[in-house]
Image (spheres, grey):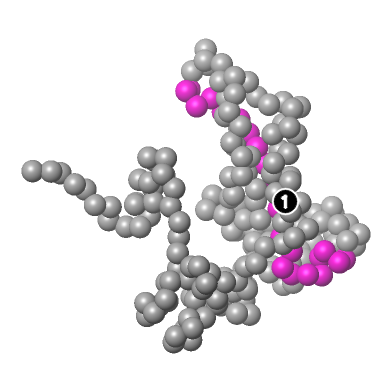
Amino acid sequence: MCNIIIPSSSYEAKRKLRDLGLGYETIHACKYDYVLYSKEFTDLQYCPTCGETRYKVNHNKGKNFRIRDKRVETNDVLRHPTDAEGWKHFNCEFPYFTSDPRNVRLGLTSDGFNPFGHMSTSYSMWPVVLLSYNLPSWKCMKETNFFMSLLIPGPRSPGREINVYLQPLIEELKDLWNFGVRTYESLTG
């Protein structure tokens, strides 16, 4: 008898595919199964048959992302990067950027580690993580809101040459800035 283990959730199935080095494509479906949002329906926001919205609307999600408009300043206490003088200076210097609440402010952090745990082994991994400072202070530093954008492996730390490794990320961020990307506006629908 064959022992076949079927994944218990879509998350587990995706994880197994990833572990095997296989990709997958996510295709949305109408809530009532009238259409798949692929091919000629890829860009539709509503089902052409029943009119139901493609995405589940979460009115609270967008509210968390727009903290700049609703921050309350406290006297000389740095609770979030928005409290810093550099942030305030940026707001004054670039009002065209700061006035649009859809713009995203990112922080970049990196720190290397030895994945083998042996000091005698000369090897390092350097994750490069982006943080969204548009989120409230109690959310922006949670691991679930980190974007691991690069993983730099090698026999030693990248040192001053880290700029070489950051070039693909910088190019992608430039494209995002110059051309943008279509997203669903969860606050206004």
- Which residue is drawn at the image coordinates 45% and 68% (left, top)? 28
Amino acid on which disc 1 is placed: Leu
Report x, y in % for residue 105.
73, 57
Quarter of the image where the N terminus is located: top left
- Which residue is drawn at the image coordinates 37% and 40% (left, top)? 20
- Which residue is drawn at the image coordinates 64% and 58% (left, top)? 137
**Depth order, front residue of 27/56:** 27
Report x, y in % for residue 163.
75, 34
Q: Residue furthest top?
A: 120
Report x, y in % for residue 8.
27, 56
Q: Residue furthest left?
A: 1
- Identify the residue under disc 1: 173
Report x, y in % for residue 27.
45, 64
Quarter of the image where the C terminus is located: bottom right
**Depth order, front residue of 181/41:** 41
Q: Would residue 8 appear left or right of 24 to someone viewing this image? A: left
SS at mark 1? helix
Q: Main secondary structure of the magenta part?
A: loop
Q: Which residues are magenta?
A: 95-117
The verdict on residue 151 being magenta is: no
Q: Is residue 172 above or below residue 180?
A: above
Q: Would residue 145 appear left or right of 11 to someone viewing this image? A: right
Q: Would residue 40 appear left or right of 182 to someone viewing this image? A: left
The answer to whether residue 53 is seen in the rendering is no
Q: Residues within 10 Å of mark 1 (few under 14, many from 20)?
A: few
**Depth order, front residue of 108/81:** 108
- Which residue is drawn at the image coordinates 50% and 68% (left, top)? 39
Q: Residue furthest front?
A: 40
The answer to whether residue 125 is seen in the rendering is yes
